Image (tube, rainbow, N blue to C red):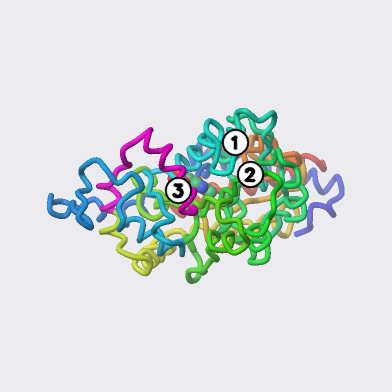
Amino acid sequence: MKPYGELTKDEARVELSAAREAFDALKAKQLKLNMARGKPGKAQLDLVSDILTVLTTPEQCVSDGIDARNYGELSGLPAAKKLFAEILGVKPEQCFIGGAASLTLMYDTIAKAYTHGLLHSPRPWCKEETVKWLCPSPGYDRHFKITESFGFELVTIAMTPEGPDMDAVEEAIRDPAVKGMWNVPKYSNPDGIVYSEAVIDRIAKMKPAAPDFLLMWDNAYCIHEFEGDYVPFPDILSLCAKYGNADMVFEYASTSKVTFPGAGISVMATSEANLAYMEKLMGIQMISYDKVNQLRHVLYLKDKANTLALMKKHAAVLGPKFRMVLDTLDREIAPRGIATWQRPTGGYFVSVNTEPGLAKRTLALCKEAGVTMTGAGATYPYGVDPNDSNIRIAPSLPPVEELRAAMEVFCLALRIAALEKRA
Ligand SMILES: Cc1ncc(COP(=O)(O)O)c(C=O)c1O
């Protein structure tokens, strides 16, 4: 098999017509497959459904003397804080427990910075002439959308296999209009990159010109290995505190991919000073999140060791799906030299970087053949990938056999897109 870069025009034409023929045969199957979003599959939801019956009596609803059914405890049940604190390696006093979506807590933090300002803000961000925001890319589309929706100017920062390009970050934060930065430090969405300790150290010791710089540390995949054992990870809160930046960072996580994405619990961890400030504002909008569900999670997950054991069961479902994706790419794409990818061992995605100019065409072809994928450009600020190259594959939802068919379509689509440029 020749790399496509070495094909003559004639060879490319022959290869293209063979690929089109195979593609038409797949189209005729009228597939309806989805690799668009990082949703757990049904087998994973069934795996954790015992959580529905762990809390059945009024007596069980009392935790540390608190009746979870009633109003109160804005920042969450102490037992839920203890659980997340152990998982993240932070202190329970640094935790605020939220509802089903950590995304809500992230949005809320930024919304409050905008309307009221953060603890060290000279003024609310809505009063600033310009707010700029650092977006390591490719990254998580919903993050970018939040900051875009507040009218911030999104600044693309390149991702390296070790994390964000820190030279670029350190240069950018000299501008006082740069108010914050998104991060998914472990098994990043979409590349599955784990930030190196050196990068994390440089982040923790940053000295941004903005006194209210907001380091968004979305640790969504903190315990989400699908290959191998749990990989311990530095606690960003204590690292920032060590460098005099205790109030710079807010960390987030949730049980969306531990129990149910639609009915889990979430956490925001930050300095006690930040929490005291934020709780004053949050206490106006609510009396507390759903503490019954917090208690259900405490009773079901128990502690970090038990939660990690559960994650191994998720890994047994997810591992074969990721291996299917990577094996197919290795077999169909690697020898043809038309794309590269990382080899994640955790998280929910595989991210393929094609030769420039192929992503949109590849995804249009996938759609024609009934395979839905995350839209081209979604992993970049404003939905625009400057190289039209990054494609996010989310293998978690379809069963392995469907995934096999979807990957067959994807690889043919990518090959056709690459051949069309050469034929
Ligand atoms: C990086 C990242 N953060 C957050 C979320 C959503 O988390 P939650 O369900 O807690 O809102 C996702 C979901 O795909 C994600 O990939």
Camera-side residue: 4 or 179? 179
State whether the magenta stretch is mostly helix, strand or loop.
Answer: helix
- Which residue does the numbered mark 2 point to in the structure image? 180
Q: Nearer the viewer, mark 2 or mark 1?
A: 2
Is residue 373 among what the camera can see?
no
Q: Nearer the viewer, mark 1 or mark 3?
A: 3
- Which residue does the numbered mark 1 point to in the structure image? 147
Q: Looking at the picture, which amino acid does disc 3 mark? A: Leu
The quadrant in which residue 191 appears is bottom right
Q: Do the residues bearing badges 2 and 1 touch, measured as CB atoms within 8 Å?
A: yes
Identify the magenta region: 270-296
Residues under labels 2 and 1: Cα distance?
Answer: 10 Å
Which quadrant of the figure contains the C terminus?
top right
133 shown above or below 330: above
- Which residue does the numbered mark 3 point to in the structure image? 275
Is residue 111 among what the camera can see?
yes
Residues under labels 2 and 3: Cα distance?
Answer: 18 Å
210 shown above or below 203: above
Asked if residue 124 is among those painted magenta in the image, a careful observer would answer: no
Q: Position of residue 98 (x, y in %)?
A: 38, 45
Q: Position of residue 419 (x, y in %)?
A: 76, 44
The quadrant in which residue 301 appears is bottom left
Q: Looking at the picture, which amino acid does disc 1 mark? A: Thr
Q: How many marks?
A: 3
Camera-side residue: 312 or 121? 121
Check disc 2 and report its element: helix, strand or loop: strand
Q: Residues within 10 Å of mark 1 (few under 14, many from 20)?
A: many
